[in-house]
Image (cartoon, helix red, strand yellow):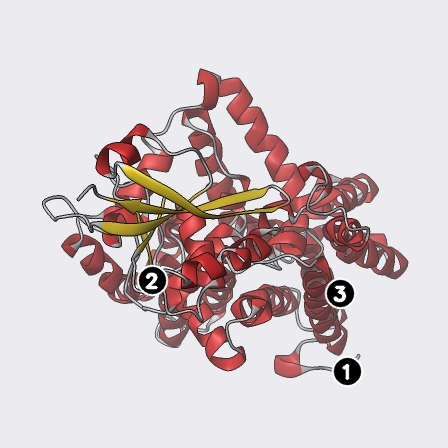
Amino acid sequence: MLEGIGGLPSRVLALLVLAWLLRITVLMASGAGLQVDEAQYWDWSRQLQWGYWSKPPAIAGVIAASTGLLGDGLLGVKLLSMLLWPLSAAVLAWLAWDMAGRGQAGEHAALWSAALLLGTPAAGILGMAATTDAPLLFMWALCMAASWRALRSGNGRSALPWWALAGLAMGLGLLSKYTMAVAGAAWALLFLMHWRRHGLGLVLAGLLALAVFAPNLWWNAIHGWPTLGHTAEITVAAQTRGGSRLASVLEFLVGQLLLIGPVAIALGLLGWRRAKSLQGLRPSTHPEPAGFALMFCLPLLLVALLQSFNARTNMNWTVPALLGACLWLGLYVAPRLGRRTWWISTAAALLLPAAASLMGSLAMVQSQALHAPRHLDLWARMRGWEPALRELQAPLAAEPGLPVAATRRDLLVHARYIWRDLDRSVMAWPHEGRARHHYEQFESLWSSGQEPPRRLLVLTDAPLSDEFKRQYPRWQQLGASVSGRIRLELWLATVEP
């Protein structure tokens, strides 16, 4: 087999490019805009900082680089984040190839591992989004690969450059999402097992990771620890929905099955059944790769499972665990199934998420997407914002110079993105009590102790509350717009003379 970049089989590289182009095609055919978090990350990317209210800064940096290359359009915002998914699969394929000996067995393991990862519903859906999962997944994969090469180095000193690379990946992963800290459990296990040869290297990696992560800690410290506080609030301090722990745990378990998808589950079960014995899945000639793969998978699943007993766990929190799971399947289970199974399963794995995503596009072609049931359209939450906000541009322009306040985060970030060429700043309506999101804490129209403006525009999607009417007695509706599920109103609020 011909070799591609870095020794990877050329078929692996072709698979990565095919998956990336397929996702770009599906995205552009969907007719959808940005999801609320993507619009928020885009807005953050215009003012790069070392931290933000709910997330570390990496995703803002990725989007800033992407829009710097391709502009602020839909593909410009998403493209580099989308590229990080096949790059993560490339790192995983290289790791499988190296683990399996770089021969024919390594080529098969590389193909299976990359195909299994790219064929998961997580990659099929999240692989088209600009979210924190994209840089986290890539840094997790890079940390795994560098840690493995460090362990395989001839002596402790020659492993130090690899441990430094692993530390850099760990630090950048922490700047992507705090979930990366769970990968430290794998390092702790490796330290206990290999402290004589690699203790110094692991300490070096940890110190480098902390050095890379330190600016985000500094930013949190000077702003009252908002990111760490938000993370604790949605994990430690949160409660299960409806008080049902069993329902929360079951929801988590079902979510994990949905993440990895039917193809990987079926292949795993089929490969296990075809194995002559359990010993066959743990060949004595290569006992280390299996344990290594599971070290970077099981701790994250265990932490998320324990978390589900306390609060509802978003199923995408465990996305990096797919790397270890797909690596293990690619090394020990899937190669037993033969080349024909590989082609069939790869095609199914890549096309099933695309088909599910294109259901929304089909509805759009039939002029029904804006009104179709949400469960039939994966893009439902990304539709309707642009036409609704464009319709309000005329009444907005009729009141030049007036500040604009949005009553909710999703209204604010979508308005900032869609009105980005109008030079109108949209701020958050101040909230009494503790801030609920980034803009209430850092970008509210006025803060406690300040005098509110006597006239302003208010963007809302709900009836005016008593709080608004107490602050501004006079209200005049300047415009209203409807686009599918999106219903917006623009009001002029005035203090009585």
Q: Secondary structure at mark 2?
A: loop
Dots 3 and 2: beta carbons under 8 Å?
Answer: no
Residue denoted by label 2: 425
- For the question of whether residue 434 can be seen, the reply is no
Residue kind at label 3, given as amino acid type? His
**Residue 139 at x, y = what percent?**
46, 63
Q: Earlier in the sequence, mark 2 or mark 1?
A: 1
Q: Earlier in the sequence, mark 3 or mark 2?
A: 3
The correct choice, above or below, for 277 with respect to 193 in the image is above
Between the C-alphas of marks 2 and 1, the distance is: 54 Å
User: Who's the residue at 74% across and 70% down the image?
Assistant: 18
Q: Quadrant of residue 84?
A: bottom right
Residue kind at label 2, given as amino acid type? Ser
Residue denoted by label 1: 2
* Mark 3 crowd level (few <14, some 14–19, many ≥20, 10 Å Cα): many
**Residue 228 at x, y = what percent?**
27, 46
Q: Nearer the viewer, mark 2 or mark 1?
A: 2
Residue denoted by label 3: 108
Between the C-alphas of marks 1 and 3, the distance is: 13 Å
Between the C-alphas of marks 3 and 2, the distance is: 54 Å
